[in-house]
Image (cartoon, rainbow, N blue to C red):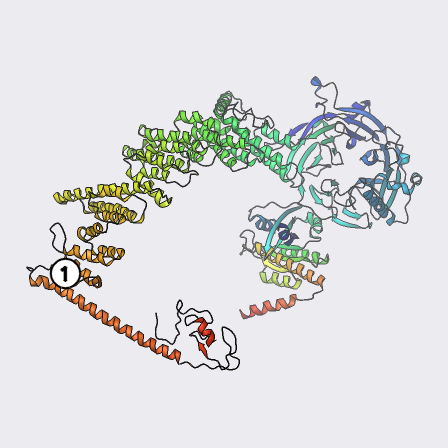
Amino acid sequence: MASGIENKVKNAKLVLLGDVGTGKSSIVLRFVKGQFVEFQESTIGAAFFSQTLAVNDETVKFEIWDTAGQERYHSLAPMYYRGAAAAIIVYDVTNAATFTRAKKWVQELQAQGTINTVMALAGNKSDLVEARQVTAEEAQAYAQENGLFFMETSAKTAINVNDVFYEIAKRFLQAQAQQQQNTNGMILTDRAANRTTSSSSCCS
Amino acid sequence: METHRSEKDRVVLVPFTDFDPAKLAGYSPAVPLTIRSLAVFTASEVETLIYVGTGGGKLILLSLNPTLPSTSSDDSSNAPPIAPVQFLRSATVSNRVIESINVLPEIRRVIVLSDGFLFLVDTLLLQSIRKLGFAKDVTAISKRVLQPDSSISDPFGDGAVRAEFSRYGQTFLQKFGGGIRVNGTASRVSELQRGAGTGCFLAAATGKKLLLIELFLPSNVDLDAEHGSISIRWKEIQGIEGVKTMVWVGDSIIVGTSEGYILFSDVTGKGSLIFSLPESSPPLVRPLLRSSDVLLLFDKVGVVSNALGHPVGGSLIFQYVPESIAELHPYVIVARDGRLDLYRKKTGVYVQSLSLKKSSVGPCIVANDDQGTGDILVIGTTYKAFCCRKVSPEEQIKDLLRKKHFKEAVYLAEEFESEGEMTKEMLSFVHAQVGFLLLFELHFEEAVDHFLLSESMDPSEIFSFIMRDPNRWSQLAPRKRYWGLHPPPVPLEQVVDDGLQAIQRAMFLRKAGIVNATDEDFILNPPSRADLLKSAIENIIRYLLVCREKELLPPVKEGVDTLLIYLYRALNRVPDMERLASSENSCVVEELETLLDGSGHLRTLAFLYASKGMHSKALTIWRILAKNYSTGLWEDPIASVDYDSNSTSDLLSGQRVAAAEASKLLQESSDQVLVLEHLGWIADINQECAILVLTSEKRSKQLSPEEVIASIDPKKVEIHQRYLQWLIEDQGSEEMHLHTLYALSLARSAIELVERDSKLDNHLAERSNEMSASDVANKGALTYHVREKLQLFLQASDLYDPEVVLKVVEGSELWLEKAILYRKMGLEELVLEILALKLEDCEAAEQYCAEIGRQDAYMQLLDMYLNPKDGKNPMFKAAVRLLHNHGEFLDPLLLLEKLSHEMPLQVASGIVLRMLRARFHHHLQGQVVHNISRAISLDTQLARLEERSRNVQINDESVCDSCHSRLGTKLFAMYPDDSIVCYKCYRRLGESTSARGHNFKENPIFKPGWLVTR
C-alpha cells in the first residue's frame, strides 16, 4: 500500500535564479517553512531544500536549489539548472535592473536548450507598491512572448508564493503526462482539453 | 594543539599525539625537512602507517599505534616508555618536492608523485623504488573510487564480478587512442592469467592529456613480490591542460583547472564543464567516499556533486578558502594556516574548530585513510605533524553527559540515529542513561520522559529506586550500568537526600567562589525535600502506568503493579490505589499485606485480596470495616476534614459500601460456609445485598436451600421470603415444604400488615389531622401488594399444604385467601359462603359456580343469598343478579317465596320489577335465538336443495373416482366435494366419506355460495 503511494510521488528538480537581493531565498523560505526574515543573509553557493506538494491525487516532491545571486557565483548556476524540471527566475519589481538581469537568465536557459524545463517568472516584492519600477503588464508581455508563466509574488506577505510552486507542479505533471502519452503513441489530446476549459470559462 | 570551542562546540576530533618526522627519522636538525605531502593507511587495528613526503624528495614511513596512551613531544615530564608514533624507514624518491602520496592497498603499493614523475614503491618501503617512465610532467594523480552500488562495486570480491570487471577494464582501456601501449613487464603476464588477481586504477594528468592507468597484480604472484610482477596498462585521454586536482569516481574523472571543473567519462573519453571558476579561486576536488560524491571547492564554498556532475544538497560554507580538505565520515575537515574546522557533510553545520600552536603555523595538510576506514586524522604543518582521533558517537555523547549537557547529548544522539551512525537500540540506551542521570539530578519529570523514550529499558530497572534492595525483584532487574555515569540505584528518598546535599555543597562552593556544573535553578531556588519526593513518586507512577500497558514478563508485571500500590500509598492516593487493587492486576499480596494493614488502607487490601481470589480474607476485612466504620478507619484522611453532619451519612454509606463489596464477592462464591458466615452482617446493613447474595446465579454450585433457610435470621422476613420466592419462581423448585414455607411466610406478613393497617385506621380515626394521607396510602399499597402476592401464589401453586396455611390464616381477615385455600381443599360450600356472604363478591361467587360447573352450585348460591346465616337479611339484589345471569338453572319462584310478607311494596317492587324484566329479557332473547336458528335452518335447506339439484355431465371417458371403472350407463353418485363414484362404490364407501377420502362428518365443507357460516 505504501509503495502505491510512493509511486505517485514525483521528484522535480527546481532551481531559483535571479539577481542578488531579489528575494529568492525568501521565496523558498516562505514556501518551505512558511517564514519570512526581514534581513535574509545573502546566499553563498547554493542552498538546498525539499518540499512536497499535493496536486489532485499526485504528489510532487520539489528538490529546490536556491542559488546565489551574486555575480561571482554566476558560473555555478549551470550546474544547478542543468537537468532541472523547473526554474523560477526572480526579479525585484522595485528594481528595473533586476528585470533586465532576469531576461538574461531566460536567454541563458533558452540558449542551453532546456526546453522541457517549466519556467516561471516571478516579480517579487509586489507588496512594495510605491517603489514599483517594473509594471506587471510589461513583465506579463515578456513572459507571454517567451513562453513563461508569470506571477507577481511577495515573500513578505506570502502573496502568490505557494501559487507559483503549485502552478509549476501542475505544469510539471502535465508535461510528464504528455511525455508519457507521447511515448505511448497518443498525440495531442492536450489541445482538446484546453478547448473545453476555455469554452467553459467563456460561459462564465 | 589547542581546541577552540564555545559552550555549544562538540568534541569530535581529539588530538592525541604529535611528532617531528625529521627528528624521529634521525635526520640532522641542520638539514630541515619540510612536510609537503601526507598519506595515512590503516594497516591493522593496532597499526596505522603514516607516509610523509618532504620537500627534498624523501618519503618517510612511520607507524602509529593509536591504542597506546597519548603523548606529546612537549610533554616530556610524563613521557610513556613507548611513543605511539615510531619511525619505520625512509626512502629517497627524488630530489624534488613530493607532491602526493597514494596508498594502493589492493596491490600493496604506494604511488608517489614527485618532479612530474610517478614512482611505485611497496607499502613498507622495503623494495627499491620504480619510476613509471611512461608518465611525464604529471601534475595530479587520483585513485579510482568505485561506487558501492554499481555492478563493478567489488571487482576483487568473487570470480564472476572480477571477470566482468576485467572485461570492463579492458573495454575502456582499449576504446580510445589507437591501441594500448603496454610496457615490457606486462607482456610477461599472459592475458589468460589476467582473470584472477587484484588491481587498481589510477588517473594521472600529464601536460595536455589524462592517463588512465591500470596496475594489476595476478593472484599467483605474492603481494610483496618485486614490482616486475605487476602489469601496468594505460590509456590516454587528450584535450585537457593545466590540471591541478583530480578525482576519479566510478566512471567519471573530475579534474580541476584554474578555469573550472571538467568531468570526463572514462567510457567515452569526452569531457564536459561542470562549472567554471572565477579568477583567484583555486581548484580543489576531494572524493566523498561514503556517498561516492565529490566536493568541489569554489572560493570558500564546498559544492557537493555526484559522479555525474549533478548537485547533491546545499553547499558547505567554510570560513576561509582551505588549503587542504579531508573527509572523515560523517564530517568534512578543512584546514588552513594551522587551523582546522569540522563540518557535518550532510547538513553543512559547523561542528568543531581546532587550531595548532602558533609556533607550528605554516602550510597545512590534512590526511586520513583514503579507504574510508580508520578514525585517525594526521595534520601536517611545515615541520611537525599532529595526530587526531575521531571520537565515536558514543564517546561524544558521553562527554556531553559528563558535562551535564543532557539536552545537547540527546539532540546529538538523535542526529546520529537519523543519519544512520547509531542504531536505534543505542538511542534507546542513551535515553535511558540520560534518564538515570536526570533522576539523580532530581529532574524527575524529564528523567521519566527519557525513560519513556527508551524502548530497551525495562521497568524492573527502577524497582530498586522504589523498594530497597534486596527485594523480591532484585534478581530480576538486568544489571545494566549503562556508561556508569550515575550511581547505583538507591531508594528515591536517598536520591533526594543525596541530591539536596549536593546542592548544598554547590551553594557552599559557589560562595567560596568555585563554580561547578550544578543546576542553576536549584541553586537559586533550593527545592524542598517534600516537593522533590512528591515529584519523584508522581513521575515514577507515570512511568509505571505507561509500562503497565506494555507486554511484560509476569514477574516484572507483578513488580510494576505492586510498586504502583506502594507509591500510591506513599502519596496517599487512595482512589487510585483502590482502583488498581479492584481492577485486574498482578500485585503480589504478600508484599503489600502488612504495609496496607499497618497504614490502615484496609479497603485497598480487601480489594486486593478479592482480586487475587482470597475471598475469605477480603470478606473478613469488609466485616471489620463494616463494624469499625464508626471509628473512622474507613475514612479517606483527606476527606476526614468534612463536616460532621456529613459523617453520619458517610458512615452509613461506608457500611453500605462494605456490605455491597462483600456481597459482590459472595455472589460469586460457591463456598456455602463462607456465604452463611457473612450473610448475617451483610443482612444487618443492607437486606438487599443479602438477598442478592442468596439469589445470585453467578456461582457455579448452588447453596443448599435447607441450610440457607435455617441460617436466615427469622426476623429478616424479607430475605426469607425473597429467597423462597427466588427458589420457587426463578429456580422452579417443586419442593412441597418450600412452597408451604413461602405461603406461610407470605400469609404471616399479610396478617401482620392487615392488623397493622387496622390499628392504623383506628389511630387515624383518633387523630386524623396528624397523619398525612399519603402515608396511609403507602401502607395500604404495601398490604395490597403483599396480599396480592399471597393470593396469586396460593392460586398458582399446587404444591403447598393448604391445611397448614389455613391454620395460620383461619383466624384472620384474609377471607379471599381463605376462599382460595378452601377451594384447594375442595370445600365448595365454605368457599361460596366466604365469597357470597363474607366478601359479598357476587362476581367471584358466580365465577366459582361456573368453575364447579354443576347446576346445584348455582342453586346453593341462590339459597345462600336468600338464607344468609348469622341473622343477615336475604341478599335480594345479589339473588336477582344471579337469576338474571344464570336464570336457566334457577327457579324464580324460590326468590319470590323468600320475599317477606311484611316487605313494603315499593321495596319489593324494585326486586320484582327487576326479576320480571329479567325474565322478559330472557324470553325475548330466546325468541331472537329461535328466529336466528330458523333463518339458518332455512338457508341450510336451500343450500341442500341447490346442492342436490346440481347437474353433472358425464361422457364415455368418465370413470369412477374409487374403482376407476367406466361409468358408462351405470348409476352413479356425487359427493359434495365433486368426486364421482359408481353406485357400487357409493354403497361401499358410505355417505360420509368421499372417494377422495374426505370425511364430511369430521370435516364438513362449506361452499362459498351457502349462506350458512359458522
Amino acid beneath label 1: Leu
Q: As drawn, is B154 to the left or to the right of B333?
A: right
Q: Position of residue B309 (x, y in %)?
A: 74, 48
Residue B525 in view (yes/no): no
Using the image as rendered, state which of residue A26 and residue B51 is in the foreground: B51
Q: Using the image, determine if residue B231 lies above or below residue A136.
A: above
Report the number of numbered marks: 1
Residue B965 in view (yes/no): yes
Q: Using the image, determine if residue B928 lies above or below residue B513.
A: below
Using the image as rendered, state which of residue B743 and residue B609 is in the foreground: B743
Q: Position of residue A179 (x, y in %)?
A: 69, 60
| Quadrant of the image occupied by residue B348 | top right
Q: Using the image, determine if residue B736 lies above or below residue B80.
A: below
Residue at numbered disc 1: B895
Q: Using the image, determine if residue A195 lies above or below residue B779.
A: below
Tell me which chain the residue with mark 1 is part of. B
Name the residue furthest top.
Answer: B77
Using the image as rendered, state which of residue B104 and residue B659 is in the foreground: B659
Callout 1 secondary element:
helix
Q: How dense is the environment of label 1, judged by Cα within 10 Å: few (below 14), some, or many (20 and up)?
A: many
Using the image as rendered, state which of residue B211 and residue B911 is in the foreground: B911
| Quadrant of the image occupied by residue B575 | top left
Q: Position of residue B803 (x, y in %)?
A: 26, 43
Please identify the quadrant where the N terminus of chain B is shown. top right
Q: As drawn, is A139 to the left or to the right of B613?
A: right
Q: As drawn, is B369 to the left or to the right of B604?
A: right
Q: Position of residue B273 (x, y in %)?
A: 76, 50
Please identify the quadrant where the C terminus of chain B is shown. bottom left
